[in-house]
Amino acid sequence: MNREILTIGHLARQTGTKVETIRFYEKNGLLPEPSRTDGNYRAYEQEHLDRLSFIRRARDLGFSLDQVRTLLMLADDRSQSCAAVDAVARERRNEVERKISDLIALKGELDRIIDRCECGIVADCRIIESLSTAGS
Amino acid sequence: MNREILTIGHLARQTGTKVETIRFYEKNGLLPEPSRTDGNYRAYEQEHLDRLSFIRRARDLGFSLDQVRTLLMLADDRSQSCAAVDAVARERRNEVERKISDLIALKGELDRIIDRCECGIVADCRIIESLSTAGS
DNA sequence: CTTGACCCTGTAGTTACTACAGGGTCTATC
DNA sequence: GATAGACCCTGTAGTAACTACAGGGTCAAG
């Protein structure tokens, strides 16, 4: 039962988050408003730190803030089925898979136009040509 | 020698660009300001259409507006070496490659946490657990 | 002469922060 | 008790690359 009070700077250092970002999460309803000290400083407790860590890990996995908000809501309701959690995670995985195949296609395109370049002058540049004309 | 006058709507339809986006490109120096009709409508010519097509193709390949600006500048100087063009394209390819490997790593992480899910209740959810605790 | 499609400028919204500006607080040291 | 420096506060504006209005003007057809 750790009831030490943490400043926003502590949270920032312990999670590798900028102070402004923590305030941003609060303003956007991801992190609950903590109580304040006499000097109006935010006074955080362990649960805030846990929640912030959760947010940061989810963000590192590329979940959008909206998805994180959903995950937090779901996580708070401990007795609910975790099917909804699973759905959010699978949705995120789909997004990542789609992005990967998009980027692989893109890289193919770039390979193709870069390979054609013989590095003469711009007038003969195959890269410029590829960008200037449609299709192939 | 095609000297027909095109409205912004024509350019938009022919390149699949929103009208607002064309104005945005103009304001940001990617597309030169065209002359105006008596009614103050933008009056484009073929070269504007070509330039806009170039911009759209480059954007489709994921070049940033800054990179597109550079490419346009380079493309305009027809007698210059195209080494600089090549460099921009290779830089873009590097970005794409980096992003692909980042996303593949991410997908691995997501696979790992999703696979552990046995879809019971949230209290036992492995996905939530993964997000709540560090490292593994 | 009115309707509807088109055009104009300018501003605000999107995502997820980041970076100030312009202040107040706290702690240590002289 | 004064002062320096580290920290905190609010609020606004900036980033990328658009997109979406609001509130107007223009133009062609009927």
Image: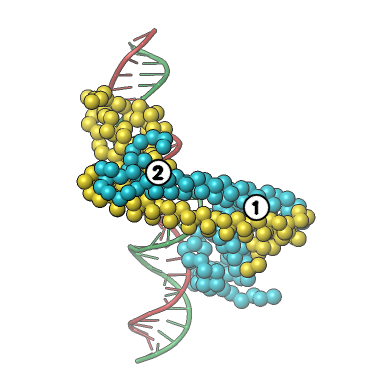
Chain colours: A cyan, B yellow, C green, D red
Q: Please, which chain is the residue tagged with disc 2 on? A: B
Tell me the number on the disc at residue A38.
Answer: none
Which residue position is annotated with label 2?
Answer: B59
Residue type, label 2 = Arg
Residue at position x 36%, y 40% from top? A130
Where disc 1 sits, the SS reads helix
Give the tally of numbered discs. 2
Q: Nearer the viewer, residue D24 or B25?
A: B25
Which residue position is annotated with label 1?
Answer: A89
Decide if residue A53 is on the left or right side of residue B117.
left
Judge whether residue B79 can be spotted in this image.
yes
User: For the residues marked 1 and 2, what is the alpha-carbon distance in whole angstroms?
Assistant: 30 Å
Q: Please, which chain is the residue tagged with disc 1 on? A: A
Where disc 2 sits, the SS reads helix
Instruction: Tell me if residue A49 comes above or below residue C27 in the rendering.
Output: above
Q: Nearer the viewer, residue B85 or C20?
A: B85
Q: Nearer the viewer, mark 1 or mark 2?
A: 2
- Within 10 Å of disc 2 (Cα), the crowding (few <14, some 14-19, many 20+) is some
